Image (spheres, rainbow, N blue to C red):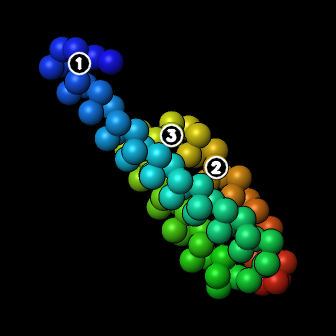
Amino acid sequence: MANHVSSLKRTRQTETKTAINRANKSKLRGSLRSLREAIAKGDASTLKAAYSSTVSALDKSVQKGIIHKNTANRYKARLNARVKAVVAPKAA
């Protein structure tokens, strides 16, 4: 256990930031899961809304430092390709 006041404060700050980061990462994973489920169902209207919210969650995670920018771009590119593969055959 820390004895110095500054060490105690740093411990409190770390616990707070850890809880915030954990909540944000959990929210991101839930958004990705809901999009993948929408892709599996193949409903175009639900899919567009789910994709939009997932991209927003990815961008917010980058801003908050939860994931790296390139990681988010990779997720978005792969998910967009999967969404297009589901939506395009029905439109054509």
Instruction: Name the residue type under label 1.
Output: Ser
Nearer to us of marks 2 and 3 is 3
Number of numbered labels in the structure image: 3
Query: Counting residues from the N terminus, which is met first, the one under dot 1 or under dot 2?
Result: 1
Residue at the spot 59% in from the left edge and 55% down from the top edge: 29
- Say which quadrant the N terminus sits in: top left
Q: Earlier in the sequence, mark 2 or mark 3?
A: 3
At horizontal 28% and vertical 17% (from top left) the residue drawn is 2
Vertical relation: 57 (above or below) 64: below
Residue 90 location, quadrant = bottom right
Residue where numbered disc 1 is placed = 7
With 49 as the anchor, is 91 left or right in this view?
right
Percent coordinates x, y for residue 54 in the rendering? 55, 63
Is residue 81 in view from this perspective? yes
> Is 92 on the left or on the right of 44, as rendered?
right
- The reply, left or right, for residue 44 in relation to residue 14 is right
Residue type at the position of mark 3: Ile
Identified at 45% across, 52% down, the residue is 23
Point out the frontmost of discs 3 and 1: 1
Using the image as rendered, state which of residue 36 and residue 29 is in the foreground: 29
Give the class, few, some or many, for how many residues have Cα within 10 Å of label 3's Cα (few <14, many ≥20): some
Q: Is residue 10 above or below residue 48?
A: above
Secondary structure of the residue carrying numbered label 1 = helix
Q: Which mark is residue 75?
A: 2
